Amino acid sequence: MAVWQALTAAGWSDLWYLDESGFAPTLPTGYTWARAGTRALVWDEPPAGRRLNVLGAVAPFGPVARLAWTVPAGKLDSAALLAFIRHDIAGLPATAGTRRDRPCVVVLDNASAHVSKLVKAARPALEAANVWLYYLPPYSPELNRIEELWRQVKYQGLPVRSYRTLADLRAAVEGALRTHAAHLPDATANFPEAA
């Protein structure tokens, strides 16, 4: 990874860290307060059918730090993942046979959608387009740099902890992501260094 980071910093490649995150209508409450002798009440919305799944990628190295995300309608599956990699990360057009000038490395974990038969079948075409998938070792989320960004969005970017509608939750999450994208160099400065 250190080699890809150096190549990206020099402008020879693009390095993206990809993962998905789910947002429930009621997010965990770290703390709250109430008057002495009274019980603190926190509104709780049932999550049934109202979970928001976001697929995102961060490119913290290179001349400009970048953040890309999508909120696919319905299930986050392998087809949505491949479309996101091709169009939003690699910038490939819809026509087949296009090759990027410089390599694009996408770092991801071993989630089922990431290692599915559909993704395995698409890897040769991605590699022909100069897009490479790099899988992290199992059970090592600390190596994926977008995990820190998800934590920041969930715990600092969303001060309201309960949303009554999915539209409200989506607007809040996308607003927090836009804010983090605007301040990405500051947000990525605290990422741990790669081994």
Image (cartoon, rainbow, N blue to C red):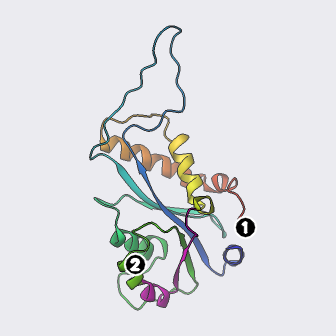
Q: What is the crowding at mark 2: few (fewer than 14 residues within 10 Å), some, or many (at least 20)?
A: some
Residue drawn 41% across and 82% down? 120
**Left or right side of 63 for 92:** left
Amino acid type, mark 2: Val
Query: Residue 42: image x %, image y %?
Result: 42, 25
Q: Which of 182 and 106 is in front in this view?
A: 106
- Mark 2 or mark 1, earlier in chain: 2
Q: Nearer the viewer, residue 21 or 115?
A: 115
Quadrant assignment, res 1: bottom right
Quadrant assignment, res 135: bottom right
Q: What is the crowding at mark 1: few (fewer than 14 residues within 10 Å), some, or many (at least 20)?
A: few
Residue 137 colored in magenta in the image: yes
Which contiguous range is marked in magenta?
A: 123-139
**Left or right side of 74 for 126:** right
Query: Residue 56: image x %, image y %?
Result: 47, 61
Query: Residue 182: image x %, image y %?
Result: 56, 53
Query: Residue 104: image x %, image y %?
Result: 55, 79
Q: Name the residue under label 1.
A: 195
Residue drawn 49% across and 87% down? 127
Residue drawn 38% across and 43% down? 24
Amino acid type, mark 1: Ala
Q: Residue 119 carries which label?
A: 2
User: Disc 2, disc 1: CB below 8 Å?
Assistant: no
Please determine whether, in this image, residue 124 is positioned above or below residue 187: below
**Left or right side of 195 for 129:** left
Give the CA distance from mark 2 to mark 1: 27 Å
